[in-house]
Image: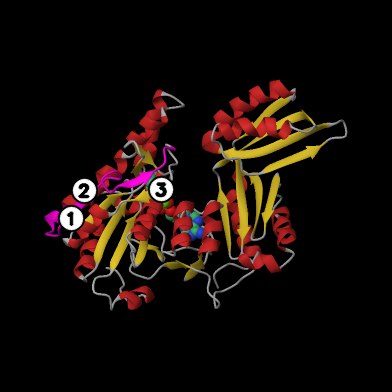
Amino acid sequence: MPDLDTEYFHSIQNKEMPLIVQKYGGTSVADLERIQDVAERVAMTYSAGNDLVVVLSAMAGVTDGLLRLANQITDDPDRRELDVLLATGEQTTVSLLSIMLESMGYPARSLLGYQAEIVTNRAFGRARILEIHAERIKDLLSKRKIVAVAGFQGRDQKGDITTLGRGGSDTSAVALASALKADVCEIYTDVDGVYTTDPNICKSARKLDRISYDEMLEMASLGAKVLQIRAVEFAKKFNVPVHVRSSFKEEKGTMVVEEEKDMERLVVSGVAYSKDEARITLTRVPDRPGIASKIFTPIAEAGIVVDMIIQNTRKSGLTDLTFTVPKSEYQRAMAIQKEVAKSIGAEEVLGDEHIAKVSVIGVGMRSHSGVASKTFAALADENINIMMISTSEIKISCIIEEKYTELAVRVLHNAFGLNAP
Ligand code: ADP
Ligand code: ASP
Ligand code: MG
């Protein structure tokens, strides 16, 4: 049962009726037994005198299964229809939880995204929340109902169903917490907090008690899927306290909060990785003004987000240009570039889907040099070749061969002294 002896609880326990938003991820609602555990935790939180909104993901693997079904029909399913399909995963879990709670004697109501009036733009598959009209939820809460909201989905201004991108239930939860001015947003998942790196691939990863919004933002944007990046953006913008914790254990997890003066400020605070990108190279591109725009404008018009770009100039007035795109957009991006290559007279278009990005992250990097050289040396010691590099004030990312991902993460984690004592 939930550990109520947490700092935020101390700060809210004097309130008449604290409001808590709890979000449970796929593994936490994987089958009826797990849903029963969720129902018990929800019932306890409710009985302790809290108002409660519960946001659920689909059962583990269900969203992937639905995607596979659509892809058996076509590589490029109609995006509106795909969202109608994908949204069904969360419909199953919210209704099951409500049935379970009602049968246990607790008053519960499920709401789908459109019923909760989560209004988004029309970018199917990666919609952004524009506003939430929370009157219906507030009304249900005022009647002391437990409100179970389907995560990952909303509706656009025409009323069409949209989804928020993979991992989007985190964003549903934080956005609801912000709209309802909840006291805390609890993210229940299959790890017991945010670690210095993915604890599933690095056994010596260390759990953090607190992490600042900025560092969490960087971790999430570089691949740490424990929180969806938009959820962290929302939390930071509206100052929503987020508590990431395990749905299988009682202990306190990690608080994601504003940067505090006494916060641990290590040079490097974490290592992240992503296998979700692919690399495209155009060879022997004419080196003259306007060419980069000819290459990237059609990609932008197709709504594809480019991450890293490098250009090598050759003596001959020709250059090679390499960039990365999300793996899910690789086929579309390749098709576009084959056309571009013809029109600008580039030699060929090469692609590679078997790459990974590993990144070291830390706000302390701003004031320290030597992080880059240490990163490169650690990878070199293991003979891991670096294909592309990008840096910012608070991170260094390297593109490497996918098969070295786990090794690279462990080596970097160790090199920067992040291992648990
Ligand atoms: P859920 O289904 O609950 O939303 P996710 O699979 O989306 O769960 O996110 C949790 C996973 O995030 C963990 O199982 C872990 O493998 C991964 N992860 C990656 N980086 C980190 C990190 N730094 N700290 C904790 N978990 C991480
Ligand atoms: N079910 C969705 C997914 O698998 C949303 C989520 O789990 O947050 O991406
Ligand atoms: Mg998730």
Q: Residue at x 21, y 70 (%)?
A: 49
Q: CA gap, disc 2 to disc 3? A: 28 Å
Residue found farthest to the right: 315
Q: Residue at x 57, y 40 (%)?
A: 305
In the image, is 355 to the left or to the right of 375? left
First to last magenta residue range? 100-123
Residue neighbourhood size for the residue with mark 2, other residues' Cα within 10 Å, grouped as few (<14), some (14–19), many (≥20): some
Kindly identify which residue carries mark 3.
130
Residue 68 in the magenta stretch? The answer is no
Q: Earlier in the sequence, mark 1 or mark 3?
A: 1
- Image quadrant in which the C terminus is located: bottom right
Q: Position of residue 63 (x, y in %)?
A: 37, 40
Is 128 drawn above or below residue 245 in the view shown?
Answer: above
Q: Residue at x 55, y 48 (%)?
A: 274
Residue 117 in the magenta stretch? The answer is yes
Q: Is mark 1 within 8 Å of ligand 2?
A: no
Is 318 drawn above or below residue 357 in the view shown?
Answer: above
Task: Tell which tag, 2 or 3, sits nearer the viewer.
Answer: 3
Q: Note whether residue 228 is visible.
A: no
Kindly identify which residue carries mark 1.
108
Residue type, mark 2 in image: Leu
Task: Tell which tag, 2 or 1, sits nearer the viewer.
Answer: 1
Residue type, mark 1 in image: Ala
Q: Earlier in the sequence, mark 2 or mark 1?
A: 2
Q: CA gap, disc 1 to disc 3? A: 27 Å
